[in-house]
């Protein structure tokens, strides 16, 4: 690991000020000299591997704003402070009651220890676990722009079938983000250019020909909160995660589903897919396919076909197309059958 | 569109990427202005300065002088001499390094020691009482043969205590799920679950 | 009594808790990288990123500029030491720093040594190599792969076994199957990282390193460093899991020793999890073709097993499990052949049940296919083909309780409730499947020495250079002394894991309990003889009794008629404070030089299929239930039952734990474990525990181990058959059988994952 200077800013504005001094406007947060750290579960790993090489770490854990550590539930929705730990949010009674899909997505992620460490904001910004990205002796367009992609023709079983480009097929492995994008969450961020709201769906960037640009954030911007608007029917929601082992593994395919039902018929469906796409993936075509339909195996299957209509697979990940569809079908039917 | 040199004869030569590691640093943009250059110089002057870190470990205060890069795990093992906490992967994938920080179980390999300034750290060495009486979880691990080689055991025990504290040991299913961050390659899992049930019931007084 | 401590049956010892348990739960068990060492310097490896070619240039300037860097050991620095040797104690003949040739991915190119771990790591990452690269051969189907006959290439496989006329019998068989199977590359991944700590005290070299073979390493390291083995001491008091990976010494050990010599201070190098994939050994991928011919009555008349194994270009590593599969059933005729396929890979090595895990997987999956083809219950099919003598040499089995294992496991599992129709069993959205398979592992033993000391106040010290890798050998050795000398276990102290102790063989091949206990038994019996003589001489408390009629129990020597003498009183009468006995055990059939070879780190293995009088194997039967989601096809194993017979069980607790661990290994091998090799570059891709999946707690639910009583006096004096490797043989086939039963999909290539079931 490269050496780094460690700083502990006291509040958000101090953190932004330091970050601003040591980063430039056009710099990507993941490539900047000064980087923020909260739980460290992703960044420390990548620093050890030489994938992330900041020379200054700004520890956000001492920021004094109480809201950063709070979960506030109101009629407007749920506001998660950025420094709330995954485990705390997963165990929150109101989160579990109002948005099971959120609690599920957090509970099924990583391990108990990692959930105790990782902040919610850090979790949504976690970087891909692509093996070729993690090991610096491989070429990787995300790690070193223009160096190539070793995964395309390599071992790509865990790679994305949706949202990939000719430059990158790395999967976004997070779970929580699927719940957030399904529920139209908004991220609050503060940087040297002020505070702003970023719709969750705009936070992550498709790889296109610039896979090294991973998010919409500037290098001196800090996520301060994640807001999930109140949706009464989100009580009928769940997160289904399919993986190679029962726990502590990334999704091969996952589905976040929330359903507003009128009897058997779908008034509104919210669907996001994980483990199969390069970014958190809202499946709007699938949602549209279910609109006003009776939800049964046939309509669920039609929605799944729509969700994966544009899927492109490679040598080892072709199974993910079918698995992704079946995961969605199962998630839809299980969500339909929830007793709420 | 970018070429994919790993799979095509054209594009960047295989040779050049093999000449060393390619990291983001190699391509990091230069700092924009003179002011930034000054900042950079300031950074470098402090880059390798040791930092003072105060920790309470198993109830004892420690004042350490550490490289900022030193993980809490390496601080415990190499700087404090508490080698009960184990390094199994150093990347947060096995759970062998689990300790309690301010009562919560965390992975000490993924936590820079400096970030734990002022924290109370509990390791496996801090569980037995001063008269040598084992913590109920330690005794339960012995009773149920919840280990073989014993290497992951300190992490399992700390994680198990954290798991009960969190309220995630209410059923065997819960225990299995919430203990899945601790890999036991000898695969003592059923015995670990039985041990946690015993310790849970004892510590709850049931 | 809880599940962890089964009530001992006939010929089974008490489920005593491990005698080192307290150390392990308090963090006081010191594994080699934990041993306190003053003034230590830290080493970090730099490894190659190509699999074949030459290092043309090594740029060290950036690394040398790292503050705190002390030294870099690289090309030229190992010229005065001998290259490693491949064999019993050496993992490979490749001396990575002896020349600039790159033989495999992840080969050591330098060792950076610094004042701190952080500086060493930083420097190692800054070492830049330039290569002249050649197109490497990754595996079986890669261009440049060279296939050769295995027989004769390695002492482990002298010839391909056969019996009768397979071709004629197969051609004549009314029912035939011909199928191909494969197993993937796997890495042991013990949770303890591989490490070497070396320091010199004058001419004396002391090495702390987790090993299954302190004596072999002492000799091999001394040979490489050209020093007297008496000047090398290897310490490995606790080992954090081994599974074969710590049997042979890798080139790192000598490199770290050289670094310590150059610096004149201790150097510790802990290999990263990722680097271990290329610097240690592994289980290479295998392929199999199995042909079985049988009559409609289910009697097998013809069996052929062809195997292909990957090895490195440097070394002919062979497992050749056809020795066991060719003897498993009453086949009529047997044809086997093993081929090696040379590739640009690091040299493979022993991994828990090296030959049997892949080969028996193929055999047992084929047996299940044949049972299906015959329309026969798979248990019945095996019962019909149960042999009286093994088919190759027509020798009897010293004992064989396979059918008892099947019967007891089937009963406990509820096999009778299984609907044999494929896909017939369901539970809601879950397809239920049940399958079974046979486990087999050769029973061997090797020469072993031990020293036992009994003091007048009843303290026992057992010293033996064996290795506590988690098997419980420290406990059962103590238990043997406790039983033979009649002292409570808490009075017994057992020292192991030190090359200065009486030598023991490598802790591999499931020989430790048998070999160590036989040596300890012999030493204890020598002590008993001395005390008995002291107690029965004229005028002594037990005068008139015969030695062989005396029993040692509860601190007393008890004569047949009930008269007894306290051991401490006998000591007083004899006017000695302690009796110290050094025993050397050599198994039946050992050559005259066998003991000498033990001290030279070259232990002879006897038993298995080597002996003249009989073949010696332990057996088991495993039953598995799988559940497969009807939509998403993930496979779970809610239930597994294994029944095993392995002669005398020293301790039912540690025996059950080992078998349980083996069965879980088997589940992992069936469903999860695989090292992926990038075929273009012959490089490992998933080099960590994030992507190399092994079972976690939530994967394992209801697991039952049945210890079937068995008495076998022929195997060794202790009557013990090893069982550390038995549990994970056959499991994967049982899972494959259950998956077939649930889905109708016959999966022949491991691991069985969603990919294969979703199509």
Image: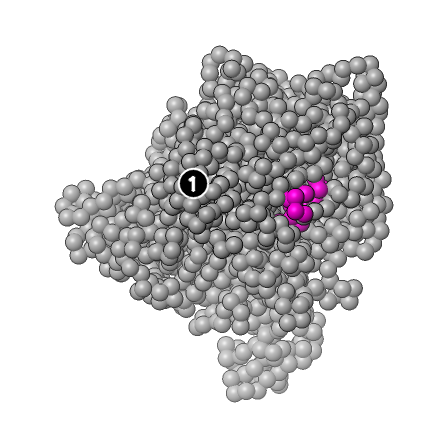
Which percent across, then down, holds residue B36? 80, 18
* Chain letter for mark 1: A
Residue B167 occupies which quadrant of the picture?
Answer: bottom right
- Sort mark 1 into few (<14), some (14-19) or many (20+) by Cα contacts within 10 Å: some
Q: Is residue A75 magenta?
A: yes
In the rendered image, residue C726, in percent from the top left (x then y), is placed at 43, 55
**Residue situated in front as seen by the camera: C606 or A101:** A101
Q: Secondary structure at mark 1?
A: loop
Residue A250 in view (yes/no): yes
Front residue of C66/C450: it is: C66
**Residue B150 image position (x, y, % from top left):** 61, 55
- Residue most toward the top? B10
Q: Which residues are magenta?
A: A74-91
Left or right of C305 in this view: A138: right
Q: Residue at x 72, y 46 (%)?
A: A70
Magenta span includes C234: no
Q: Residue at x 46, y 45 (%)?
A: A331
Q: Which residue is mark 1?
A: A292
Image quarter (top left, top right, bottom left or bottom right) of the C terminus of chain B: bottom right
| Residue at 56% across, 71% down | C483
Q: Is residue C73 above or below residue C581?
A: above
Position of residue C86 measured from the top left corner of the image (x, y, whole percent): 50, 36
Can residue C523 be spotted in the picture?
no
Q: Quadrant of residue C140?
A: top left
């Amino acid at each position: 690991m490269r050496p780094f200077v460690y700083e502990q800013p006291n509040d958000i504005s101090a953190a932004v000020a330091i970050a601003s001094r040591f980063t430039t406007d056009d710099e990507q947060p993941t490539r900047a000299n000064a980087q923020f750290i909260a739980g460290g579960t992703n960044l420390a790993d990548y620093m050890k591997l030489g994938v992330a090489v900041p020379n200054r770490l700004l520890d956000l854990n001492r920021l004094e704003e109480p809201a950063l550590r709070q979960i506030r539930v109101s009629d407007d929705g749920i506001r998660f402070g950025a420094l709330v730990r995954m485990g705390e949010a997963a165990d929150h009674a109101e989160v579990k009651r109002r948005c099971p899909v959120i609690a599920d997505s957090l509970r099924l992620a990583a391990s108990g220890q990692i959930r105790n460490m990782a902040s919610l904001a850090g979790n949504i910004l976690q970087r891909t676990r692509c093996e070729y990205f993690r090991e610096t002796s491989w070429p990787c367009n995300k790690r070193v722009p223009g160096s190539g992609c070793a995964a395309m023709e390599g071992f790509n079983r865990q790679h994305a079938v949706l949202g990939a480009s000719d430059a990158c097929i790395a999967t976004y492995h997070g779970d929580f983000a699927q719940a957030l994008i399904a529920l139209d969450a908004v991220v609050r961020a503060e940087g040297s250019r002020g505070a702003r709201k970023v719709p969750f769906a705009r936070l992550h960037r498709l790889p296109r020909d610039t896979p090294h640009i991973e998010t919409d954030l500037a290098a001196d911007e800090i996520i301060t909160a994640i807001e999930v608007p109140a949706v009464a029917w989100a009580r009928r929601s769940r997160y289904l995660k399919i993986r190679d082992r029962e726990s502590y593994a990334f999704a091969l395919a996952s589905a976040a589903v929330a359903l507003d039902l009128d009897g058997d018929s779908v008034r509104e469906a919210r669907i996001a897919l994980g483990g199969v796409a390069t970014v958190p993936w809202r499946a709007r075509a699938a949602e549209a396919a279910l609109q006003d339909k009776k939800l049964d195996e046939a309509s669920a299957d039609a929605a799944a076909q729509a969700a994966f209509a544009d899927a492109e697979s490679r040598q080892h990940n072709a199974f993910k197309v079918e698995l992704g569809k079946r995961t969605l079908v199962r998630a839809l039917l299980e969500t339909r059958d929830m007793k709420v | 569109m970018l070429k994919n040199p790993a799979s095509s004869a054209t594009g960047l030569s295989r040779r050049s990427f093999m000449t060393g590691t390619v990291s983001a640093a190699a391509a990091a943009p230069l700092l924009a202005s003179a002011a930034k250059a000054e900042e950079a110089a300031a950074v470098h002057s402090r880059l390798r300065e040791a930092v003072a870190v105060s920790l309470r470990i198993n109830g004892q205060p420690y004042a350490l002088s550490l490289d900022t890069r030193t993980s809490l795990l390496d601080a415990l093992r190499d700087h404090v001499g508490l080698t009960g906490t184990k390094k199994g992967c150093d990347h947060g994938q096995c759970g062998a390094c689990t300790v309690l920080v301010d009562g919560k179980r965390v992975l000490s390999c993924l936590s820079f020691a400096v970030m734990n300034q002022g924290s109370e750290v509990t390791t496996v060495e801090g569980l037995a009482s001063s008269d040598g009486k084992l913590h109920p979880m330690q005794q339960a691990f012995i009773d149920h043969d919840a280990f073989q080689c014993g290497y992951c055991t300190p992490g399992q025990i700390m994680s198990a205590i954290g798991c009960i504290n969190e309220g995630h040991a209410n059923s065997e299913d819960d225990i299995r799920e919430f203990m899945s961050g601790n890999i036991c390659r000898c695969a003592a899992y059923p015995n670990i679950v039985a041990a946690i049930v015993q310790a849970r019931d004892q510590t709850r007084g049931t | 009594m809880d599940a962890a401590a089964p009530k001992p049956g006939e010929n089974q010892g008490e489920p005593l808790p491990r005698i080192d348990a307290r150390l392990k739960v308090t963090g006081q068990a010191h594994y080699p990288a934990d041993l306190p060492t003053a003034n230590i310097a830290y080493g970090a490896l730099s490894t190659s990123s190509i699999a074949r070619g030459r290092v043309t240039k090594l740029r060290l300037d950036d690394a040398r500029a790292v503050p705190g860097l002390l030294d870099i050991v690289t090309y030229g620095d190992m010229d005065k030491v001998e290259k490693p040797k491949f064999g019993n104690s050496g993992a490979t003949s490749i001396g990575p720093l002896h020349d600039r040739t790159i033989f495999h991915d992840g080969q050591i190119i330098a060792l950076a040594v610094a004042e701190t771990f952080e500086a060493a790591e930083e420097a190692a990452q800054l070492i830049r190599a330039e290569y002249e690269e050649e197109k490497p051969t990754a595996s079986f189907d890669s261009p440049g792969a060279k296939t050769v006959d295995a027989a004769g290439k390695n002492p482990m496989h002298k010839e391909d076994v056969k019996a009768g006329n397979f071709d004629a019998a197969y051609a004549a068989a009314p029912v035939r199957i011909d199928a191909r199977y494969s197993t993937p590359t796997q890495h042991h991944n013990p949770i303890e990282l591989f490490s070497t700590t070396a320091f010199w005290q004058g001419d004396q070299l002391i090495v702390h390193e987790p090993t299954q073979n302190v004596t072999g390493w002492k000799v091999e390291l001394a040979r490489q460093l050209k020093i007297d083995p008496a000047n090398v001491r290897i310490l490995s008091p606790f080992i954090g899991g081994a599974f074969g990976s710590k049997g042979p010494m890798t080139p790192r050990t000598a490199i770290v020793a050289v670094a310590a010599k150059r610096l004149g201070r201790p150097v510790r190098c802990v290999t990263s999890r990722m680097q271990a994939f290329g610097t240690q050994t592994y289980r290479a991928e295998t392929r199999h073709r199995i042909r079985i011919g049988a009559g409609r009555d289910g009697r097998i008349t013809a069996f052929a097993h062809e195997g292909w194994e990957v090895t490195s270009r440097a070394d002919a590593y062979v497992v050749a499990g056809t020795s066991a599969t060719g003897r498993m059933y009453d086949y009529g005729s047997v044809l086997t052949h093993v081929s090696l396929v040379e590739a640009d890979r690091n040299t493979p090595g022993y991994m828990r049940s090296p030959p049997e895990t892949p080969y028996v997987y193929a055999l047992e999956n084929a047996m299940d296919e044949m049972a299906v083809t015959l329309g026969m219950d798979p248990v019945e099919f095996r019962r019909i083909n149960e042999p009286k003598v093994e088919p190759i040499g027509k020798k009897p089995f010293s004992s064989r309780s396979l059918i008892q294992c099947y019967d007891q496991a089937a009963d406990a599992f509820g096999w009778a409730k299984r609907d044999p129709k494929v896909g017939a069993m369901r539970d809601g959205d879950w397809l239920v499947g049940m399958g079974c398979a046979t486990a087999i592992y050769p029973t061997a033993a090797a020469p072993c020495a031990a020293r036992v000391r009994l003091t007048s106040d009843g303290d026992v010290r057992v010293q033996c250079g064996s290795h506590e890798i988690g098997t419980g050998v420290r406990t059962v050795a103590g238990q043997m002394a406790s039983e033979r000398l009649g002292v409570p276990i808490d009075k017994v102290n057992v020292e192991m894991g030190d090359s200065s102790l009486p030598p023991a063989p490598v802790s591999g091949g499931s020989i430790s309990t048998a070999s160590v206990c036989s040596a300890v038994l012999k030493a204890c019996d020598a002590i008993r003889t001395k005390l008995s003589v002291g107690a029965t001489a004229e005028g002594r408390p037990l005068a008139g009794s015969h030695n062989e009629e005396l029993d040692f129990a509860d601190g007393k020597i008890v004569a047949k008629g009930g008269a007894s003498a306290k051991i401490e009183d006998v000591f007083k009468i004899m006017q000695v404070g302690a009796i110290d006995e050094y025993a050397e055990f050599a198994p039946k059939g050992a050559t005259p030089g066998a003991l000498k070879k033990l001290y030279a780190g070259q232990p002879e293995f006897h038993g298995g299929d080597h002996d003249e009088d009989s073949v010696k194997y332990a057996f088991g039967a495993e039953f598995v239930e799988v559940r497969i989601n009807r939509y998403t096809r993930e496979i779970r194993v809610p239930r597994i039952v294994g029944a095993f017979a392995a002669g005398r069980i020293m301790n039912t607790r540690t025996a059950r734990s080992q078998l349980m661990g083996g069965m879980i290994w088997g589940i992992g091998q069936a469903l999860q474990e695989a090292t992926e090799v990038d075929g273009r570059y012959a490089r490992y891709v998933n080099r960590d525990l994030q992507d190399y999946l092994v079972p976690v707690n939530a994967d394992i639910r209801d697991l039952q181990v049945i210890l079937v009583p068995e008495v076998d006096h022929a195997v060794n004096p202790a009557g013990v058959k090893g069982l550390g490797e038995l549990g994970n043989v056959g499991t994967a086939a049982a899972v494959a059988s259950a998956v077939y039963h649930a889905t109708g999909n016959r999966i022949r290539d491991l691991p069985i994952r969603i990919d294969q079931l979703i199509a």
